[in-house]
Amino acid sequence: MHQMTLAEIARGLADKKFSSEELTKTLLARIAQLDPQLNSFITLTEDLALEQAKAADARRADGETGALLGAPIGHKDLFCTLGVRTSCGSKMLDNFKAPYDATVVSKLAAAGAVSLGKTNMDEFAMGSANESSYYGAVKNPWNLEHVPGGSSGGSAAAVAARLLPAATGTDTGGSIRQPAALTNLTGLKPTYGRVSRWGMIAYASSLDQGGPLARTAEDCAILLQGMAGFDPQDSTSIDEPVPDFSASLNASLQGLRIGVPKEFFSEGLDPRIAELVHTSIKELEKLGAVIKPISLPNMQHAIPAYYVIAPAEASSNLSRFDGVRFGHRCEDPKDLTDLYKRSRAEGFGPEVQRRILVGAYALSAGYYDAYYLQAQKIRRLIKNDFMAAFNEVDIILGPTTPNPAWKIGAKNSDPVSAYLEDVYTITANLAGLPGLSMPAGFVDGLPVGVQLLAPYFQEGRLLNVAHQYQLNTDWHTRSPAGF
């Protein structure tokens, strides 16, 4: 049963080939057996999962249907979950049990999804490798010496290892798409505002967006259907109708205009990945797509702009973690200043501290105009580049990452080299656009992804292209040895 996709599980449950309770027990046993190798979960919720599975079986027995009804999933551990530890991968929140469900959690629970637990992640979603977690690094099931990508690396590793059919993630600068690429999954970052951020612990509020991680575009469509929708509790949620994402999966690609930016193939891209991307382009051409060279001239400024804006917002968001109302509190503080200083120094890891310092500096008097304001101007230029490109093409295609997964610890002494792994993904976050990564081959036995970008609220188009590609390739069907 663990090899089934979300769509296959939905059909199996509908045909009464197995129950949700049987499936849940099978996967919980598999997690207990295999996850010690991967460290992909922070918290398992066995009792809750079995309770939800039994409820889903009862709902099906009463005649209810639904693609997610009884389907097991996992949640990235920054989605607040009532009565369950929600740690954000940090010592700061190691003792925090959320008093409510995030909107994404409650929507998926209402759809009948069964939550098996909370997946490991980079601390406060800050990282590209899932090495900054207080609970230890997550390992890539394709090679246990390599990273799975971050910050949604726990969700990605669990799905890639067939511990789960699908999981939620969040994407601030590529944190769904990058781990999807490095673990041979399909991962989708929706348009900013498509999925509610209420109850999702913030890293950078103008960039964060929740989305699905699964093995296929078809599965991502199913999970996104359950996650998406307007939420009046979230001021950044957009009141836009949610289409049936699965309905457009089989549309023809005949005449689809695909833009390929020359900037995506500059120095720094592994030539073997470039070759796989061009192979994917040829495959899509066979399906009727028309390829057009385009330019995104301001892409070169994306990394510096992102690493001013994101840390600035993080320094503001993380100021609430001060040891007063919730989270880690230092022992025997001498006074209020000592409480703040020691609680934060003890609760936050090095990467989080680094980004808070950078962000506080960028927002400080005398530097706000020089750094933060300039970065926001660059952000607008990047958005304008995309708007101009989408007047000429329907989607944009390129590599998801410049390199395959690197060895655990290989970039620890050079954080900037890890930041550069997000060079192709962060532009979508800066512009608020939807983006998808899909499996496209292997380099040295490690997976490689191709990224698709589309205009606002065109997630259906991304899923359609990826699904048609996956009907004609088999990269997404490959599974790591031993799992």
Image (cartoon, rainbow, N blue to C red):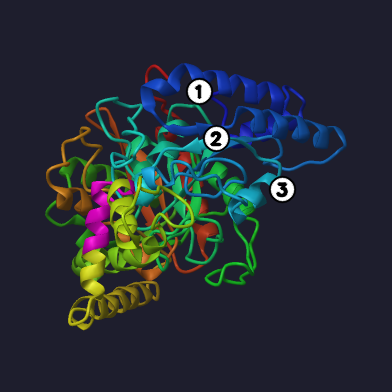
Q: CA distance from mark 3 to mark 1?
A: 24 Å
**Position of residue 143 in the picture relative to residue 155 (left or right):** left
Mark 2–mark 1 CB contact (< 8 Å): yes
What span is in magenta?
Answer: 347-357
What residue appears at the point 35 percent right and 47 percent down from the top-left corner?
332
Element type where label 2 sits in the image = strand
Mark earlier in primary sequence (2, 1): 1
Q: Is label 1 in a helix, a strand or a loop?
A: helix
Residue nearer the viewer, 156 or 65: 156
Does 351 lie within the magenta span? yes
Return the x and y of residue 179 as percentages of the image width and height. 36, 42
| Residue with the mark numbered 1 | 31
- Number of the front mark, 3 or 2: 2
Q: Could you tell me how far apart the alpha carbons at marks 3 and 2 are, in whole angstroms? A: 17 Å
Residue at image location 75% in from the left, 29% down from the top: 54
Rendered location of residue 375, percent (x, y): 25, 75
Mark 2 = which residue? 117
Report crowding for label 3: few under 14, some 14 to 19, many 20 or more residues within 10 A (C-alpha): some
Q: Which residue is mark 3?
A: 110
- Could you say which quadrant of the image residue 204 lies in? bottom left
Q: Which of disc 1 and disc 3 is earlier in sequence?
A: 1
Q: Secondary structure at mark 3?
A: helix
Lower sequence index among marks 3 and 2:
3
Using the rendered image of the protein, determine whether residue 294 is visible from the camera's viewpoint.
no
